[in-house]
């Protein structure tokens, strides 16, 4: 079977991770969630007492950070200095920290090799913001997944409400709009569609329909029998 690298970029709440997980299962390849790496750096910054005002000081802490990704039955875990932090990095607060650290060039270059090394060794579907433009510019397939902002906020709200019943839709929507703006207007590796990426807008699609459409795009690009 041919090695294949698939890049999925797009704003938060577009459903990148659910889609990528399902496609990974279908093709029997690894799903790499790169947002988890930025979240882990954000988590570390918060643990060390940094705030949004002095967040750039995280650059001085990078030497202390050892990050590893490991996979158990297709599920990714992030190991920060020996501890599995996967369960601590999914809060709204850490989302904002992740977005803040992700605008710092030194943080981006610190995480680049970790991402590229996995794709060099394995067939992967990797999701993020700059996978097609920076991390894997030679990816076999590039998809930019997006949806209407209200729809994306609704999905994120449902997800977060399960863990935190007091959360309001307005706060989720406002955080999402702020994060989209930070991520798409930053100077380094902004979250934009690569010229050669295929746009997949899933506003009116069910999860199942999005997966079907993504698989159709992938098979059209690389040929079904080359990857299955
Ligand atoms: O995909 P996510 O919500 O877990 O990502 C968290 C933050 O990390 C997001 O606001 C932007 C940043 N990020 C990035 O800049 N580049 C990536 N490849 C992945 C995430």
Image: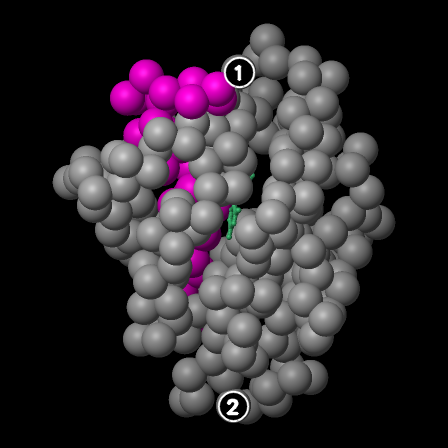
Locate the N terminus by quadrant: bottom left
CA gap, disc 2 to disc 1?
43 Å
Q: Position of residue 131 (x, y in %)?
A: 53, 62
Q: Position of residue 41 (x, y in %)?
A: 36, 37
The residue under the point 19% across, 38% down is 64
Left or right: 197 as drawn, with respect to 65: right
Q: Is residue 83 visible?
A: yes
First to last magenta residue range: 26-54
Q: Within 8 Å of ligand 1, the CB of disc 2?
A: no
Q: Nearer the viewer, residue 59 or 48?
A: 59
Query: Which type of secondary structure does the marked residue at label 1 adopt?
Result: loop
Q: Which mark is residue 164?
A: 1
Left or right: 175 as drawn, with respect to 92: right
Q: Count neighbours of disc 2 (C-alpha within 10 A) and say few if under 14, some if 14 to 19, many if 20 or more.
A: few
Q: Position of residue 196 (x, y in %)?
A: 70, 75
Q: Which mark is residue 226?
A: 2
Left or right: 225 as drawn, with respect to 41: right
The residue under the point 44% across, 60% down is 31
Q: Position of residue 139 (x, y in %)?
A: 53, 76
Q: Is residue 89 visible?
A: no
Q: Is 220 placed above or below 210 here? A: below
Q: Count neighbours of disc 1 (C-alpha within 10 A) and say few if under 14, some if 14 to 19, many if 20 or more.
A: few
The residue under the point 68% across, 29% down is 178
Q: Nearer the viewer, residue 189 or 167?
A: 189
């Amino acid at each position: 079977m041919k090695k294949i690298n698939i890049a999925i970029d797009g704003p938060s709440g577009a459903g990148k991770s659910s889609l990528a997980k399902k496609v990974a299962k279908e093709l029997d390849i690894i799903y790499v969630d790169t947002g988890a790496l930025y979240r882990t750096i954000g988590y570390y910054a918060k643990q060390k007492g940094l705030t949004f005002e002095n967040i750039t000081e995280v650059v001085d802490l990078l030497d202390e950070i050892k990050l590893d990704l490991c996979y158990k039955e297709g599920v990714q875990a992030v190991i920060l200095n020996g501890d599995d932090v996967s369960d601590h990095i999914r809060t709204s607060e850490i989302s904002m920290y992740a977005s803040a650290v992700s605008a710092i060039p030194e943080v981006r270059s610190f995480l680049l090799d970790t991402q590229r090394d996995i794709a060099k060794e394995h067939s992967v579907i990797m999701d993020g913001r700059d996978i097609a433009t920076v991390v894997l510019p030679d990816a076999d397939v590039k998809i930019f997944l997006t949806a209407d902002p209200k729809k994306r906020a609704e999905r994120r709200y449902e997800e977060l409400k399960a863990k935190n019943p007091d959360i309001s839709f307005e706060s989720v929507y406002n955080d999402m709009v702020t994060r989209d703006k930070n991520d798409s207007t930053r100077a380094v590796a902004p979250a934009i569609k690569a010229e050669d990426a295929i746009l997949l807008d899933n506003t009116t699609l069910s999860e199942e329909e999005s997966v079907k459409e993504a698989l159709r795009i992938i098979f059209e690009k690389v040929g079904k029998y080359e990857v299955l």
